[in-house]
Amino acid sequence: MSQPQHGQDGVPGNQPAWGNQPPPSNQPAWGNQPQWGGPPAWAAPQAGGPGQPAPGWAPGAPYGQPLYVAPPKPGVIPLRPLQFGEILDGSFQTIRRNAAAMFGSALIVQAIGAVLIGAVTVGMVQMTSSLETVNSEEEFLEAMGPVFAVMAGALGISVLIGFLGSVLQGVLVVPVARSVLNRRTGFKQMWMLAGRRVWPLLGVAALLTVGGLLAVAAVAGIVVLLFTAMGPAALLVVLPVGLGSIVLFVWIGLKLMLAPAAIVVERTGVYDGLLRSWQLTRNNWWRIFGITLVVAIMVGIIAQIVQIPASLAATAIGGVVSPHPDQETVASTMVVTTVISSAIGALVGSVTFAFQASVLALLYMDLRMRRDGLDVELMRLMETGADPDGIPGAPSSQPGSTGQPPGGGHFPYTPPGQRPPA
């Protein structure tokens, strides 16, 4: 019996020759092994198995990391604590969406102030021209009486404009708060919602105005007494006292400036509104000061940019109308230019005042979101659509509210889910 030769099939049952062995079933060929970090060469399991996602689903967040969900933004701001740019953008959007309510109300107040200031300016110019004909000391003293009266009138007008501005600041919170949930507010609707809070607003405006005047009078009296007792050497004491008084006045003013907003939105009284503003601004004074200062600088620059061309145009008109003026022509030209400047000033002032009031209202909403979790309540209102004609954040829109101030009128109020102090 002959032996099988090398390379021939010598195994019973027709076994294949050496080197022709078939590869194991469903195994990848040599050199086609799956690489580290690459996709596997074997087939993926069928969808629908236990613990397998359905085909077409988006991959989730990495293991151990929460999936980020952006806060909703139904209106002019996102429902979370705000940044400086969001406050500015929200203020511009609020004015644009509620122009009749905000711009119209501010224009009324500014127009009243412009008319009164224009009248005082014209009277002052006429009295100044009459001083040129004075020939004796008695006539000078008689002429200075009306001048001092006009100056006192100008001071009273300034106080009146500040008083009305404080009241209007509280009223303008209504369209700002409603714009947070993309609810537009008309002129009539704004005053109807804020009308019930007019008396507390008048009270807090009067209290702040009288308090400011008394503080200024006290500082002026101290300065006069120091100069009377010490003479020129009192300047060494007056300068630190004056600077300290200004710092104290600004600090207290910023601590209490949110009282009108709290009175309108949270339906508090005068005392509770002042206390609420004091507590909301706690640990946030420097942030509020920075935002208020930047906005004031912006508003001042814009007002000057607009007023300078208007003043130049009024001067040019006077030069064209009367190139060789006499005294009567000068007075007439002064009246015309004062009217033009007052009208332009009223328009610019209404826009800047509405913008500043919007910034303060959004600061109030921001502080409440930081301290009281107001954003959670606003999300609930957004989802349910409750109280569509009310003021978001008011006690009537909170669950189980009786229409009274939060916490029974005692602040600080701590609703469920309160954040730590910002």
Image (cartoon, rainbow, N blue to C red):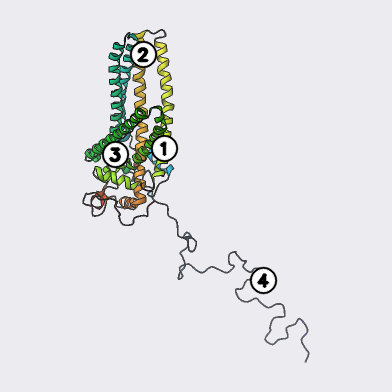
| Residue bearing mark 2 | 333
Q: Position of residue 215 (x, y in %)?
A: 31, 35
Badge 2: how crowded within 10 Å, few (<14), some, or many (20+)? many
Residue drawn at (41%, 36%), measured in percent from left and top?
A: 295
Task: Measure the alpha-carbon separation of dots 1 and 3.
Answer: 20 Å
Q: Earlier in the sequence, mark 3 or mark 4?
A: 4
Between the residue at mark 4 and the residue at mark 1, the CA separation in whole angstroms equals 74 Å
Of mark 2 and mark 4, the one earlier in the sequence is 4
Dot placed on the residue nearer the N-terminal end, 4 or 1: 4
| Amino acid type at image mark 2 | Thr
Residue type at numbered disc 4: Trp
Residue located beneath label 3 in the image: 170
- Compute the Cα span from label 3 to label 4: 80 Å
Mark in front: 4 vs 1: 1
Residue 30's disc is 4
Splitting the image into 4 quarters, where does residue 252 fall?
top left
Badge 4 vs badge 1, beta-carbon distance below 8 Å: no
Nearer to us in this view, 152 or 205: 152
